C-alpha cells in the first residue's frame, strides 16, 4: 500500500512543481494580434439576419480602426464599449433591412461603420478597416 502512494506521489510531483513555477512568473502584457501600433482591434460584431425560408442567421463583421493620432487613439481605446455599441446598433439596423437572399454590401457597411466611428470620436481621424464579413 505504501509503495502505491509513493508511486502516485512521485508521478504527481512534476505537475505541482510546474504549476508553482508558472504561478511565480510575472504576468505577461496583453499582446496585440496584429495591425501595428496605430491599429485598434474591435471584437467581432454580430447581428441577426433573416434567411431563406424564415430561418434566422448571424451576420458577423470583423473590423478595426487605424488611428495615427496618439490622443485620438487613447480616446478610442477608452471608448471601445461605446464604439462597439454604436457599430452593433448600426449593423443590426442594416441586417434587419437586408433581403433574405442578398449578400451584404461591404462598401456600404464600411461607410456606415466609418460614419459611426467619426460620430463617436467627434470627427474624422480614424480609418475603419474591415477584416471579414460572414453569414452563418
Image: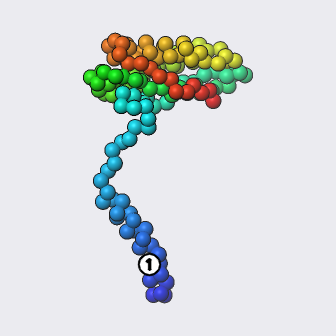
Q: Is residue 75 visible?
A: no
Image point 62% across, 26% down: which residue? 135
Q: Nearer the viewer, residue 42 or 126?
A: 126
Q: What residue is shown at x 47% (from left), y 81% (from top)?
A: 7
Percent of width and height locating residue 72: 30, 21
**Residue name at image x 55 percent, y 14 percent:** 107
Q: Quadrant of the C terminus?
A: top right
Q: Is residue 87 above or below residue 3?
A: above
Kindly indicate the quadrant of the structure image that contains residue 22.
bottom left
Q: Secondary structure at mark 1?
A: helix
Residue 32 in the image: state x and y as whole percent.
Answer: 40, 37
Which one is in front, 31 or 93?
A: 31
Q: Position of residue 34 (x, y in %)?
A: 44, 35
Q: Does 97 sit left or right of 125 as displayed? A: right
Q: Which residue is mark 1?
A: 10
| Residue neighbourhood size for the residue with mark 1, other residues' Cα within 10 Å, grouped as few (<14), some (14–19), many (≥20) | few
- Identify which residue is drawn at 36% across, 27% down: 38
Q: Where residue 9 appears, x then y in whole percent?
A: 43, 78
**Image color mode:** rainbow
Name, please, the residue furthest toward the left: 71
- Left or right of 107? Residue 42 is left
Amino acid at each position: 500500500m505504501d509503495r502505491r502512494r509513493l508511486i502516485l506521489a512521485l508521478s504527481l510531483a512534476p505537475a505541482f512543481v510546474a504549476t508553482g513555477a508558472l504561478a511565480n512568473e510575472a504576468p505577461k502584457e496583453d499582446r496585440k494580434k496584429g495591425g501595428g501600433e496605430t491599429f485598434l482591434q474591435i471584437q467581432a460584431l454580430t447581428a441577426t439576419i433573416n434567411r431563406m425560408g424564415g430561418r434566422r442567421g448571424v451576420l458577423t463583421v470583423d473590423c478595426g480602426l487605424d488611428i495615427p493620432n496618439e490622443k485620438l487613439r487613447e480616446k478610442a481605446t477608452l471608448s471601445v464599449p461605446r464604439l462597439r455599441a454604436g457599430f452593433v446598433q448600426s449593423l443590426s439596423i442594416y441586417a434587419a433591412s437586408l433581403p433574405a437572399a442578398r449578400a451584404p454590401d461591404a462598401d456600404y457597411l464600411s461607410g456606415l461603420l466609418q460614419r459611426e466611428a467619426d460620430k463617436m470620436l467627434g470627427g474624422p481621424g480614424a480609418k475603419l478597416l474591415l477584416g471579414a464579413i460572414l453569414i452563418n
